[in-house]
Amino acid sequence: MGLMKMAPQTFKNLFKKPVTTTYPFEPYKYQERTRGHIEITIDECIGCGMCVRCCPCGTLSVDKIKGTWSIDRFDCIACGFCVEKCPKKCLHMVQGYQTPGPEKSRVTYTKSPEVLEAEAKKRAELAAKAAAAKKAKEEADAKKAAEAAAGDAKPAEAATDKE
């Protein structure tokens, strides 16, 4: 009795196009708004850490000095919050998925040496400006203190002269 129910479906399938895709041989065509995985244009990243602060899973980490950005892809839920919060828009949600790997790992992106060198120069210039401003403020404070001390000494001399 089961054979009689299955026979019509078998004959239909013999003359129809296959339902399955040819995935390994042709890439899958994703829907327009499919969330896949997060990619970064690392040289545009300023290392502000907004993506790290808004990530609900805590999968991201940023090191501004070393110029690195890393993600643990197995823990990422691809919610896209980090992409929305990035002020420089260097994070992108890419359709498709990462190729599977045999073990859980963290992917780390590093800025190019030219960009790291330029950022180091900029930090050095800012530090020099800050040091110069601090020195100028200390000198101005010392000058005001000296003037105040000289101003306090004059009325005291005038008071001793009157007596």
Image: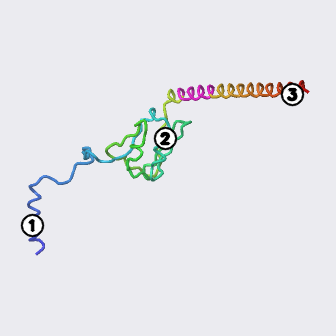
Residue at disc 3, secondary structure: helix
Residue range (magenta) = 117-129
Q: Which mark is residue 7?
A: 1
Left or right: 159, with 68 as reference point: right
Residue 75: x %, y % from top left: 44, 53
Residue type of the residue flagged with mark 2: Trp
- Residue lying at 91% horizontally and 27% vertically, measured from the top left: 163
Q: Residue at x 41, y 49 (%)?
A: 101
Tell me, yes or no, whether the highlighted magenta stretch contains residue 128: yes
- Measured in 3D between alpha carbons, the distance from the residue under mark 2 to the one under mark 3, in whole angstroms, is 69 Å
Mark 2, residue position: 69
Q: Residues within 10 Å of mark 3 (few under 14, many from 20)?
A: few
Q: CA distance from mark 2 to mark 1?
A: 58 Å
Q: Is residue 141 left or right of residue 104?
A: right
Helix, strand or loop at label 1? It is helix
Q: Which of pointers 2 and 1 lies earlier in the amino acid sequence?
A: 1
What mark, if any, has residue 70 been given in the picture? none
